[in-house]
Amino acid sequence: MENPFLIRTAELLRDDEAFLAVVSPEPVTHHLKKSGEAGILYDRLVLIRGTPGSGKTTMARLFEYPTLYTLLRNRSSTGYKELRAALSECRAVKDEEPLILGCRLPMESDYRDFWEFPYADETKINLMMSLLQARTVLGWFRHLQAAGVPADQVEMVTRPESQALLDTIGGVKGESVAARAAEVENRIYKVITALVPPDLAALAKEVGTPYRPFDHIVKIRVPAVQGSAAGTRELIPLAIFDDAHELHPDQFQAMERILVRRELRIARWIIARFDVLLPEQALAEATEDRSDVAEYPGVTAGRDTVMILLQSSGRRLEQRKRFRALAKDMASRYLRRMPLLNDKGLTALADLLPEADVAITPGRLRELGGKVDSAQTQLRISPTLRAAYEKQIKAYWGDKTALPDDIALAMLLVMMHRTEVRRSKSSPSLFDDEGDEPEAEPSRPVAANDTAYEAARFQLFRHYERPYYFGIDDVCDAGSENAEQFLRLSAELVEAAVTQLARSKAPSLAPMTQHKLLRETADRIMEKWSFPQDASVRLLVTRIADECLKKSLEPNGAVIASAFAVPQAEFDALPKSDPTVARVLQFAVAYNAITLVPHHNQGGEVWCLLELGGVALLKYGLTLRRGGFIPGDATRLRGFIAGGGG
């Protein structure tokens, strides 16, 4: 049986109905709703940035005209109701009619070839932009034709001041505009596929007059093809340039300069990873302080551009909760496409990943008990204090379930070591030789709390092989707020559940099975890392993981770490002070190896946290909880990448 969790949605689901069935409306609502309601999605240049698998292409495809048309054509389907509502809030549809005519152009094909031509940069850029505009216009007509609107029923609405230049785009009638676009594409394609590029004089003859329809077209008038409205509708033409990071950086910047002009009336989006940017630009975008930007989550709006980041930004607890909701919804949509599970009503991934009680073996439990008794003696913990701690632990746990013996002992051990660390350095007693010295009190009270519990769970995992990664929330958190990474981690779990079901066993996976599969999958994902600077990124991640593990295994469990911290001022200076380190960090962020958490206030300082991605946390056996970090500086960071300890 095909496992849809292994399919990259936007690229491989060619059928629009199948595509829509697995798309969650939550990212659209979160990233685009406010901008759409304000009208700024379609009146200026929109720059969408995201890591691989963050949903860039999925979002782009969702706003293409065929997808909107299919969605509205199936308006009676309850499965599309939430998605229709989200797109309506973004002003992409209204009254059962599309409001925009979107066309997505992948930039992975032949556009970078222009940069190899023996022409001036301006000539190369003009050639590329003419081809992009011709293909966009042809894409608009192709999408309308597929929806039942032939070119002879289409009319361009143009700027009044363009009247004298309309012959350069074929006029305003659909048939002539489409013919002119096809002619331009044909002429330029012959140039870029020629064995020998023509000289400059021959090039002008081959290509003909300048072609700039984006400068003239305002809207596109078409018949109302569905819904209750009669007559015509004026659609907002939308050009989506996807995977623009495939361009040469100079090409990318030139295209952005051309499309940012305010006199352009068409909607235009540029979608790219961080790869195409200079290190200082990429790190500045990833670390911009958006903590006080409540109106547009992850969006920076200017007079001429709108920046949308498809990754974690703003309030991190809210981001994690938001992604958990998205991931669970997405997983349910995928499970419904698997008949063996859907027919049995197994459409919630949480049902396959129970969080049943786990415990270490009886032999290891006895070993842990002996370790606690030894620590009590060595750390001079009185029976009275031990009894008080045990009472605290029971009160912390409550009466919801029985307190696991291993958790109780591990928390007690952590609290004993915290007592030792926090004891005041008292003066020696005058009666040491009598053996009756009263027990020194800790400088701060030791409590059974969440940090002690997490330290206990972590140390049981590292020292006694207790399952640590299990349950739907852990899978979501390991996804690092990246849809594709979540799907890749989930795929192995779903495959194992299906295998058990096919063997007439219960499909739910034991916690140890979940734990083992997640770590093995993460290890395979890291093994296959292949991107610019991947060796340096892997070295950086490994060194940070080593530091975090060393700190997390301290017996008092003071810090269960998942990040390395650099003073924010030092981090901001990296692009100039150490461009090599900045470049490595750029690709670490671009490929989900590290998440930057800027402007983190703690200990009277402002830090930038380099938080390890979920795959690295699983591979190296570190906590998925956020907040714990190792303080450092730019010098140590430089040492990590160079292979030293800093």
Image (spheres, rainbow, N blue to C red):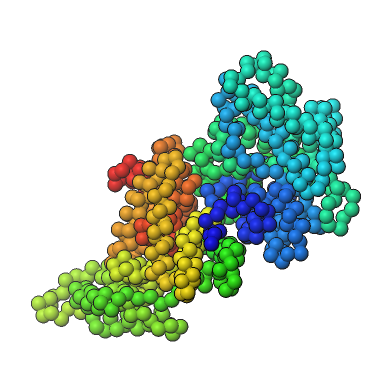
Count of labels in the image: 0
Q: Which of these two is toward me, 417 or 80?
A: 80
Q: Is residue 199 placed above or below 248 in the rendered structure?
A: above
Residue in the foreground of this view, choosing between 274 and 578: 274
Image position of 20 (left or right of 357): right
Whether 549 is drawn above or below 304: the answer is below
Counting from the top left corner in percent of width and height, residue 436 is at 15, 81
Instruction: Report x, y in % for residue 382.
Output: 23, 81
Q: Nearer the viewer, residue 528 or 340?
A: 340
Which residue is at 74% across, 35% downward? 214
- Which quadrant would the C terminus be assigned to in this image? top left
Q: Is residue 531 visible?
A: yes
Determine the image quadrant of residue 467. Answer: bottom left
Question: Going by the image, does 142 lie left or right of 175?
Answer: left
The residue sitting at the right extreme is 231
Residue nearest the viewer, comparing 426 with 109: 109
Asked if residue 562 is positioned above or below residue 173 in the image, the reply reads below
Q: Residue at x 41, y 77 (%)?
A: 357
The location of residue 425, given as percent across then percent down, is: 23, 68
**Residue at the image point whose x is 31% and y is 43% from the top:** 643
Q: Please state the horizontal and vertical placement of residue 435, each as a whole percent of the image.
A: 13, 79
Q: Residue at x 56, y 68 (%)?
A: 340
Whether residue 607 is visible: no
- Position of residue 580 relative to residue 338, above or below, is above
